[in-house]
Amino acid sequence: MSSASGLGSIAASRGCGRRLGRPALTYPSGVYYPATRTDVNRFARLQDWKENPNVAKPFEVTDASFDAEVIKSDTPVLVDFWAPWCGPCRMVAPIVDELSDEYDGKVKFVKLNTDDNVKTAAQYQIRSIPTLLVFKGGEPVGQIIGFRPKSDLKKKLDGVL
């Protein structure tokens, strides 16, 4: 990766993380700092997205875009109601990402931040997060509240399809 992109690179050589024996992130300015596993994973996901930006991933909707993206959608839609401070929401996010790849073209996956979009959350009486609502034909047809394993979400989606 060129330094012109401004993202830096991950260096796994001994010189970069020599004291810690692990990878380090390199900025274009030449500054190194030890990389955590989370840093490395985020960097890898960013690289994957840059190489294939058309991969089906959940995208954000707002109060303003909810009708166009969810209610008027021709395909079923799974809406992940979440908030940045919510631990279980962060646990369910990778599962929703995996399902978006598996159900690509069959189900649309979107996320709605309940802190920033109170109107839609109140309209669907979201009292607890994470809440996953499945919409078909503009109407909610399924609901999962709280963290659930991937198999439970697949059963719900298969029941809707």
Image: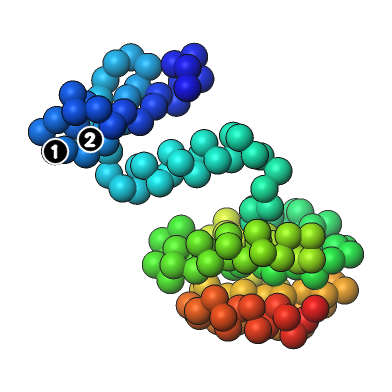
Q: In the rendered image, is residue 83 in sight?
A: no
Disc 1: which residue: 20
CA separation in Å, label 2 and label 1:
7 Å
Q: In the picture provided, is 52 more to the left or to the right than 64?
A: left
In this rendering, the answer to whether 84 lies above or below 76 is: above
Residue nearer the viewer, 64 or 95: 95
Name the quadrant containing residue 144.
Answer: bottom right
Question: In the rendered structure, which amino acid carries the disc numbered 2?
Answer: Pro
Question: In the rendered structure, which amino acid carries the disc numbered 1?
Answer: Leu
Name the quadrant containing residue 131.
Answer: bottom right
Name the quadrant containing residue 161.
Answer: bottom right
Q: Residue furthest front?
A: 13
Q: What's the residue at 66%, 39% (across, down)?
A: 53
Q: Earlier in the sequence, mark 2 or mark 1?
A: 1
From the top left corner, tell me how far across and down residue 14 is, in percent. Answer: 19, 28
In this rendering, the answer to whether 50 lies above or below 29 is: below
**Secondary structure type for disc 1:** loop
In this rendering, the answer to whether 49 lies above or below 132 is: above
From the top left corner, tell me how far across and down residue 52 is, in percent. Answer: 65, 39
From the top left corner, tell me how far across and down residue 152 is, in percent. Answer: 58, 83
Q: In the picture provided, is 113 more to the left or to the right than 9?
A: right
Q: What's the residue at 80%, 70% (across, down)?
A: 76
For residue 34, which numbered disc appears in the image? 2
**Secondary structure type for disc 2:** strand
Q: In the rendered image, is residue 32 in sight?
A: yes
